[in-house]
Image: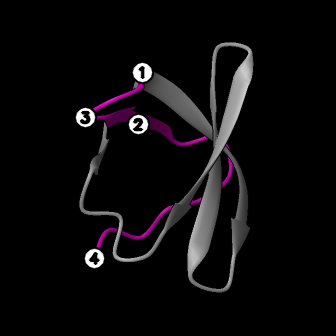
């Protein structure tokens, strides 16, 4: 499982390029343009850049 922090740049299989906006217990909020998406652990669809 990747370790993610606020301001990390990521890519998502469906949403494309994004930036981590918040980190919670078992999830992250990622901003993809004007949309914010909550991604649950284990973050298998996220790749850190």
Residue 21: image x %, image y %? Answer: 73, 44
Residue matched to label 4: 1
Q: Residues within 10 Å of mark 4 (few under 14, many from 20)?
A: few
Q: Kindly state the secondary structure of the residue where label 3 is placed.
A: loop
Q: CA distance from mark 1 to mark 3?
A: 9 Å
The answer to which of marks 2 and 4 sits earlier in the sequence is: 4
Q: Kindly state the secondary structure of the residue where label 1 is placed.
A: strand
* Residue 13 included in the magenta stretch of the image: yes
Marks 2, 3: nearer the viewer: 3
Q: CA distance from mark 2 to mark 1?
A: 6 Å
The answer to which of marks 4 and 1 sits earlier in the sequence is: 4
Q: Look at 65% across and 13% down and name the residue there.
A: 33
In the displayed structure, 13 sits above or below 3; it is above
Q: CA distance from mark 4 to mark 1?
A: 19 Å
Q: CA distance from mark 2 to mark 3?
A: 10 Å
The answer to which of marks 3 and 4 sits earlier in the sequence is: 4
Q: Kindly state the secondary structure of the residue where label 4 is placed.
A: loop
Prevailing secondary structure class for the magenta stretch in the rendered image: loop
Q: Look at 25% across and 34% down and name the residue there.
A: 13
Residue matched to label 2: 10
Residue matched to label 3: 13
Towards the viewer: 2 or 32: 32
In the displayed structure image, the side of residue 25 where residue 3 appears, left or right: left
The answer to which of marks 2 and 1 sits earlier in the sequence is: 2
**Residue 17: mark:** 1
**Residue 8: mark:** none
In the displayed structure image, the side of residue 29 where residue 19 appears, left or right: left
Q: Are marks 2 and 4 in contact (CB under 8 Å)?
A: no
- Start-end of magenta stretch: 1-15
């Amino acid at each position: 499982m990747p370790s993610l922090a606020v301001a990390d740049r990521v890519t998502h299989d469906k949403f494309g390029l994004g930036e981590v906006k918040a980190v919670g217990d078992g999830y992250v909020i990622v901003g993809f343009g004007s949309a914010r998406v909550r991604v649950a652990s284990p973050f298998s669809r996220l790749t850190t850049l």
